[in-house]
Amino acid sequence: MKLKTKHIILGIMGLFLLIGFSTQLFSNSWGLLIGNSYVIPNQSSIFTFKAVKMNKGSGNYWLYGEDQKYYYTTLEKVHIGSYALLAKEKAKSISNFDKTNYKTWFNLQVSCNDILSTYAIKPNGLEFIKCVRPKNSQIKIKATYRVNSKQSKEIENFLVENYGMGELKWACCGWDNAGKYGGFEHPEFKKIDPYCTAIISMYASGGIKDKNEWNGIKLETDRNKIDYFIVIVELVIV
């Protein structure tokens, strides 16, 4: 029995060493242990994040890092985090890209696409629908998303907590954030204008189809019975 237990312990230790040396587990654990400012990006993990370039001065923290999907840097911060990130897929389209020089990361004009995924963090369950460039407007780019009613509260909480958006309230004929927009910054937005910023709003109409109503529309105050909530992200000159 003692021999069997010893073999089990040795097997567990061997597995631990295998995982440690075949992933970034050991190097990241050491960084977290000795560095007060060492962080693992929320989009990555202690197993996959790799510090590419460390700070040479005091403090044990990384300046550049990467994993399978993103490049990261702590030299350029964003509204909701201590680091900025760039999708590796997007980096392929940037000429003269250097993963250890963040000034080369954002040399393209802001594209009209899924703004949250590209320049911030998009919560799971939020579906990108379309992006347009309004003409002759302070709004330069407008991205539209939607989420079903079952996940709407979860998305609302995420936008409130991470972007400072106001909580949704019922008013007249639907749900909205009562004019308290969320927002975030990104170095790319400043290429449009020094005062360009992203604002976030969320709403849902309370009018749903009902053949029993004289006009075919019923006013529904139960948010769980509404098909979709809409999230709008706009790049605005303020």
Image: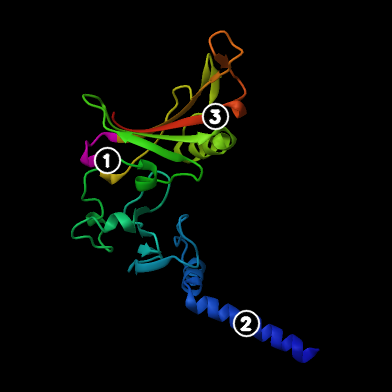
Q: Earlier in the sequence, mark 3 or mark 1?
A: 1
Give, as a single range, the part of the protein colored magenta: 189-196
Q: Kindly report the distance in space between the C-alpha atoms of the residues bearing marks 2 and 3.
A: 51 Å
Q: Nearer the viewer, residue 80 or 48?
A: 48
Q: Amino acid at mark 1?
A: Phe
Q: Check the image and name the residue furthest to the right.
A: 1
User: How far across and down, in percent of the image, does residue 32 sit?
Assistant: 50, 66
Q: Residue 108 got which mark?
A: none
Q: Residue 227 got which mark?
A: 3
Q: Check the image and name the residue furthest to the left.
A: 96
Q: Which residue is pictured at 19% across the width and 57% down the height?
A: 95
Q: Is residue 23 magenta?
A: no
Q: Residue 189 got which mark?
A: 1
Disc 2, SS: helix
The picture quadrant where one finds residue 180 is top left
Q: Quadrant of the C terminus?
A: top left
Disc 1, SS: helix
User: How far across and down, in percent of the image, does residue 21 sit?
Assistant: 49, 79
Horizontal arrangement in the rendering, residue 92 relative to residue 202 (left or right): left
